[in-house]
Image: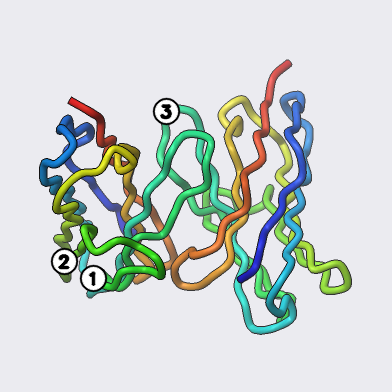
């Protein structure tokens, strides 16, 4: 079973960017697996943001984040990245990477991103 | 975009009681629906997929039903560890989650 280990908490200022990593161990990273990012903001529900299929190096994003979200994968290190730009206070959330499609069976531990001046 | 509406927002029950949680989709998702359990400080846990199939290791007291636009998660007899927030998720048209139902101890 794959394990997903995410990078640590971040504090960022409004207007800046953040990059979070998610390293996969166990299983085959280069197989036809899909990795997604889901976030949980305070007082809100879970929100799917986008996904990457490493073997195809293809990424897709929900319309809400088009233009400021980039999800990439590095086969050499079995790591998936999320980069979110033009941060706002309402981007404060716990960000989770997940593996699986169309349902999310494996999850990272979550990374808290706080956007504050 | 498919919107999932969960009800009730909060459900107060005691251990041993039966819990019934609902999820309604704004348009048909066939049986392409999952349920997750989410506890504070933990990652969400997949419970049910394809509306009624239990994920690996999920106890039999959890069951799912429904198709089209109306779905139900039932917990037959609540254990203390079942008190959490529950989300439904559709995969018929991209992915989206409901806003969650908080299951709290009465």
In this rendering, position of residue B44 left or right of residue A109? left
Of residues B51 and A55, the one drawn nearer to the viewer in this rendering: B51
Q: What's the chain of the residue with tag 1?
A: B
For label 3, the residue is A43
Query: Residue B59: x percent and y percent?
Result: 30, 61
Q: Seen from this angle, which residue lies furthest right?
A: A76
**Compared to A75, does A17 lie above or below?**
above
Query: Residue A93: x percent and y percent?
Result: 58, 34
Q: What's the chain of the residue with tag 2?
A: B
Query: Residue B52: x percent and y percent?
Result: 23, 70
Of residues B28 and A24, the one drawn nearer to the viewer in this rendering: A24
Image quadrant occupied by the N terminus of chain A: bottom right
In this rendering, position of residue A46 left or right of residue A31? left
Q: Earlier in the sequence, mark 2 or mark 1?
A: 1
For label 2, the residue is B65
Q: Are marks 2 and 1 in contact (CB under 8 Å)?
A: yes
For label 1, the residue is B52
The residue located at (73%, 64%) in the rendering is: A24
Q: Secondary structure at mark 3?
A: loop
The residue located at (56%, 29%) in the rendering is: A90
């Amino acid at each position: 079973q794959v394990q997903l280990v995410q990078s640590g908490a971040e504090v960022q200022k409004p207007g800046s960017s953040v990059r979070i990593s998610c390293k996969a161990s166990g299983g085959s990273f280069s197989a036809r697996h899909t990795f997604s990012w889901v976030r949980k903001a305070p007082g809100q529900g879970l929100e799917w943001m986008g996904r990457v299929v490493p073997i195809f190096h293809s990424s897709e994003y929900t319309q809400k984040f088009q233009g400021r979200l980039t999800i990439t994968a590095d086969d050499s290190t079995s790591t998936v990245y999320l980069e979110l730009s033009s941060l706002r206070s309402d981007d404060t959330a716990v960000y989770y990477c997940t593996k699986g499609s169309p349902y999310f069976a494996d999850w990272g531990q979550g990374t808290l991103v706080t956007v504050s001046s | 975009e498919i919107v999932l509406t969960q009800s009730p927002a909060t459900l107060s029950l005691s251990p041993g009681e039966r819990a019934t949680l609902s999820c309604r989709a704004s348009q048909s998702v066939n049986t392409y629906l999952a349920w997750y359990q989410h506890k504070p400080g933990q990652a969400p846990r997949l419970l049910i997929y394809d509306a009624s199939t239990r994920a690996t290791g999920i106890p039999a007291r959890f069951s799912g039903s429904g198709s089209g636009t109306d779905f139900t998660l039932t917990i037959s007899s609540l254990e203390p560890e079942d008190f959490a927030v529950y989300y439904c998720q559709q995969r018929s048209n991209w992915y989206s989650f409901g806003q969650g139902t908080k299951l709290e101890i009465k």
